[in-house]
Image: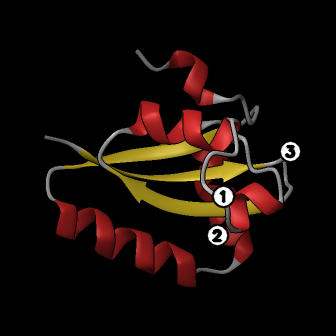
Amino acid sequence: MAFYVYIMTNKPHGVLYTGMTDDINRRAYEHREHLIKGFASKYNCESLVWFETHETRRSAFDRERRIKEWQRAWKIRLIEEMNPEWRDLADTLL
């Protein structure tokens, strides 16, 4: 089983939401459809712009917590290293 840390946004360089899941496809769908009420839904964070895979839930949880503490500029740099065009990566998932 894989675990994922991910960042969603409402537009390039817009509001950023960092989360963790064990099913990236399902979670991206839930964000797009606003199925879970909260911060991401309130600010329309519908585009998956960054994610990474972890082997353990604990590793993903620790990484998510660290990223949430980061400065915004660091998160933007992380996104742009993987996805410089801020494409919705959910479209590339199987």
Cα gap from disc 2 to disc 3, whole angstroms = 17 Å
Identify the image quadrant of the C terminus. Answer: top left
Q: Specify few, some or many for label 2: CA neighbours under 10 Å numbering under 14, 14-19, or 20 or more.
A: few
Q: Amino acid at mark 1?
A: Arg
Locate residue 39, reporting x and y percent. 71, 68
User: Which residue in the structure is indicated by mark 3?
Assistant: 11
User: Which residue in the structure is indicated by mark 2?
Assistant: 74
**Tags 2 and 1 touching, CB below 8 Å:** yes
Which corner quadrant of the image does residue 14 belong to? bottom right
Locate residue 71, reporting x and y percent. 67, 80
Cα gap from disc 2 to disc 1, whole angstroms = 5 Å
* Residue at 81% from the left image edge and 62% from the top image edge: 42
Tag 1's secondary structure? helix
Tag 3's secondary structure? loop
User: Which residue in the structure is indicated by mark 1?
Assistant: 77
> Could you tell whether 64 is left or right of 3 in the image?
right
Q: Earlier in the sequence, mark 2 or mark 3?
A: 3
> Could you tell whether 25 is left or right of 8 in the image?
left
> Could you tell whether 47 is left or right of 93 in the image?
right
Which corner quadrant of the image does residue 12 belong to? top right
* Residue at 43% from the left image edge and 78% from the top image edge: 65
Q: Amino acid at mark 3?
A: Lys
Tag 2's secondary structure? helix
